[in-house]
Image (cartoon, rainbow, N blue to C red):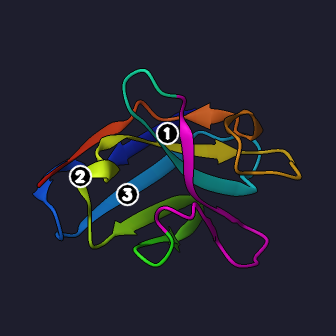
Amino acid sequence: VQVVESGGGLVQAGDSLRLSCVASGLTTSSIGMGWFRQTPGQEREFVAGLSVSGGSPTYADSVKGRFTISRVNSESQVSLQMTSLKPEDTAVYYCAARTRYSPNYRIATAYDYWGQGTQVTVSS
């Protein structure tokens, strides 16, 4: 199984950036995908997530209204459109796939497969 993120980079505050993620090699259909982010010395935090079965995506309060998670082409491809970026959005962003049900998909342990991360740096 491979989870591969792309699209990170260095931008200025107020700019937009789009991250993409593809999960391949899954033997079980993914039932959800999510994005997390992490800064040095901090725990990995939930950013956004969605379920393949439907329902509204879920967002962290800190990104609500600025970030949008979307499915792309298949249940194992998602994007994260980030707008109005702030310096505090600077982090390594990770994409993750989950193949089992979890009552709370805002936590990292709900996910089975992870990408290696892509750096997003927002300068002030």
Q: Position of residue 87 (x, y in %)?
A: 23, 52
Q: Which quadrant: the C terminus?
A: bottom left
Q: Farthest residue in the top direction?
A: 41
Q: Quadrant of residue 90?
A: top left
Q: Quadrant of residue 40?
A: top left
| Residue nearest the viewer, comparing 106 with 86 | 86
Q: Give the alpha-carbon distance from disc 1 to disc 2, as whole Å.
A: 26 Å
Residue at image point 33% right, 52% down: 89
Which residue is label 2 attached to? Answer: 87
Residue at image point 17% right, 69% down: 15
User: Is 32 in the magenta?
Assistant: no
| Residue 76 badge | none
Which residue is label 1 attached to? Answer: 3
Which of label 1 and label 2 is nearer to you?
2
- Crowd around label 2: few <14 · some 14–19 · many ≥20 (10 Å): some
Q: Position of residue 88 (x, y in %)?
A: 31, 50
